[in-house]
Amino acid sequence: MSAADIIRIILMVVFVIVCVILTVIVLMQESKQSGLSGAISGAADTYWGKNKGRSIEGKLEMFTKILGAALIILALILNLNF
């Protein structure tokens, strides 16, 4: 077993872990569709809507972007024939 094979196995394990974590984080996020009740009650003007970047939802969105980028980069690296 060469060093390239070991690196490929490690990257594949990291890739699977990133996929699972990304799936969990996406499922944890709230829906963007507020529906008719959200439009009537003015859900966009709440405290949480104004401070979204500091809320848990904002952090989940940030982690989604980071893990999505990591997923694409890992997929490209694993597709190389080294």
Image: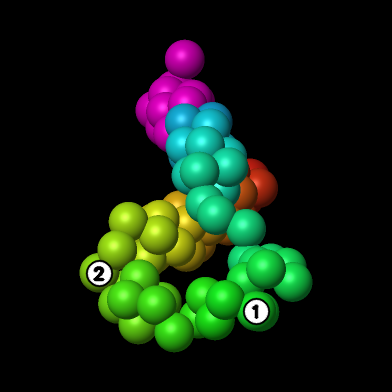
Q: Is 2 one of the magenta-colored residues?
A: yes
Numbered label tally: 2
Q: Nearer the viewer, residue 8 or 15?
A: 15
- Residue at 67% across, 68% down: 37
For this orientation, the residue located farthest to the top is: 1
Asked whether residue 24 appears in the rendered view, the answer is yes
- Residue at 39% across, 77% down: 46
Q: Sequence order check: which comes first, mark 1 or mark 2?
A: 1
- Residue at 54% across, 81% down: 42
The residues colored magenta run 1-14
Magenta span: predominant SS is helix
Per the rendering, the mark at residue 63 is none
Q: Tell me if residue 34 comes above or below residue 16 in the rendering.
A: below
Quarter containing the C terminus: top right
CA separation, marks 1 and 2?
25 Å
Q: Nearer the viewer, residue 43 or 18?
A: 43
Q: Position of residue 19 (x, y in %)?
A: 56, 38
Element class at badge 1: helix
Asked if marks 1 and 2 touch (Cβ < 8 Å), the reply is no
Q: Nearer the viewer, residue 33 or 63?
A: 33
Mark 1 residue type: Ile
Q: Position of residue 45 (x, y in %)?
A: 44, 84
- Residue at 44% across, 62% down: 61
Q: Mark 1 — residue?
A: 40
Q: Mark 2 — residue?
A: 54
Mark 2 residue type: Arg
Asked whether residue 15 appears in the rendered view, the answer is no
Q: Position of residue 78 (x, y in %)?
A: 58, 44
Comparing marks 1 and 2, which lies closer to the viewer? 1
